[in-house]
Image: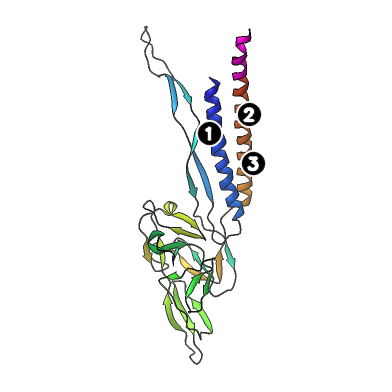
């Protein structure tokens, strides 16, 4: 009856509302450093089986198809795209971009994934102790830690992660640290916690620490940042499609309501 249509359309409205929320978040982060866009994946719910296919009748003939009535839709997951964003030239010596796969590791609160977070954002700062820290609202320290001499006049970062500092009175830059990258078998299994940081989950697997350019991880480019990989045009198209689908589910509810009104009015005749 139309009651099933009401419930099915309600699940559609709920799922599409979440999809619009995800699209809005993508568009809101179109300028966020190294932001990774998400998409919503859907799956259908259970079916009422009123007739099984293949059932034989008295003549031995088989029913070619059954009768199955779906009960709606639900969201199965949100799929985060780790496609690399555009390279944005900044000429800031502490701005670093990963060209390829991999993540920087940063020190976060101990109650989150053993105190280690992972990020693609490379907008680093040098704090008062000379340590490289991520330039978000919390300023977590890069792991393994790297300390820049306070009297350094220039910083150079090689593509393999080696950091060199020019010290007054010494014409030859000194190597002062090494930046390692971390890779995951399933990066889509990482859990975003905000502030451009992800934390490990069992679905992502254990992190593999590697020197940039080795073991399948990318290299480091100094003076560049990775931009957001959100495609505004694509997101706007998806937003329009979601709006129209939302409206159609609303129409389904109205049609089911009208059918129920007809049934309710039968007692008057």
Image location (x, y in percent) of residue 20: 59, 44
Label at residue 88: none
Asked if residue 28 lies left or right of residue 112, the reply is right
- Which span of residues is magenta-colored? 259-269
Of 262 and 61, which appears nearest the observer?
262
Q: Earlier in the sequence, mark 3 or mark 1?
A: 1
Q: Which residue corresponds to the image point at 38% horizontal and 11% vertical from the top-left?
A: 61
* Magenta stretch, main secondary structure class: helix
Image location (x, y in percent) of residue 202: 36, 52
Residue projecting furthest to the bottom: 169
Tag 2 residue: 251
Q: Which residue corresponds to the image point at 38% horizontal and 51% vertical from the top-left?
A: 203
- Quarter placement of the C terminus: top right
Image location (x, y in percent) of residue 176: 43, 80
Q: Secondary structure at mark 1?
A: helix
Q: Secondary structure at mark 3?
A: helix
Q: Nearer the viewer, mark 3 or mark 1?
A: 1
Of 65 and 196, which appears nearest the observer?
196
Question: Vertical placement of 110 versus 79: above or below?
Answer: below
Spatial CA distance of label 1 from label 2 is 14 Å
Label at residue 11: 1
Tag 3 residue: 240
């Amino acid at each position: 009856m139309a009651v099933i249509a009401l419930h099915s359309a309600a699940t559609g409205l709920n799922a599409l509302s979440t999809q619009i929320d995800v699209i809005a978040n993508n568009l809101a982060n179109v300028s966020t450093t190294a932001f990774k866009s998400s998409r919503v994946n859907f799956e259908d719910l259970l079916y009422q089986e009123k007739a099984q296919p293949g059932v034989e009748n008295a003549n031995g003939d088989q029913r070619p198809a059954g009768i199955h009535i779906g009960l709606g839709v639900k969201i199965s997951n949100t799929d985060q795209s780790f496609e690399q964003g555009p390279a944005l030239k900044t000429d800031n010596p502490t701005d670093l971009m990963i060209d390829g796969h991999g993540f920087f590791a940063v020190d976060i609160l101990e109650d989150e994934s053993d105190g280690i977070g992972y990020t693609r954002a490379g907008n680093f700062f040098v704090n008062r102790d000379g340590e490289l820290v991520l330039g978000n609202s919390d300023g977590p320290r890069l792991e393994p830690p790297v300390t820049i001499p306070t009297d350094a006049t220039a910083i150079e970062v090689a593509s393999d992660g080696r950091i060199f500092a020019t010290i007054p009175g010494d014409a030859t830059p000194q190597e002062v640290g090494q930046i390692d990258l971390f890779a995951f078998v399933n990066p889509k299994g990482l859990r975003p916690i905000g502030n451009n940081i992800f934390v490990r989950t069992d679905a992502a697997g254990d992190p593999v620490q590697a020197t940039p350019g080795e073991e399948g991880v990318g290299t480091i480019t100094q003076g560049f940042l990775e931009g957001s990989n959100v495609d505004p045009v694509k997101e706007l198209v998806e937003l329009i499609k979601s709006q129209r689908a939302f409206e159609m589910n609303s129409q389904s509810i109205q049609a089911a309501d009208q059918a129920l009104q007809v049934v309710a009015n039968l007692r008057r005749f």
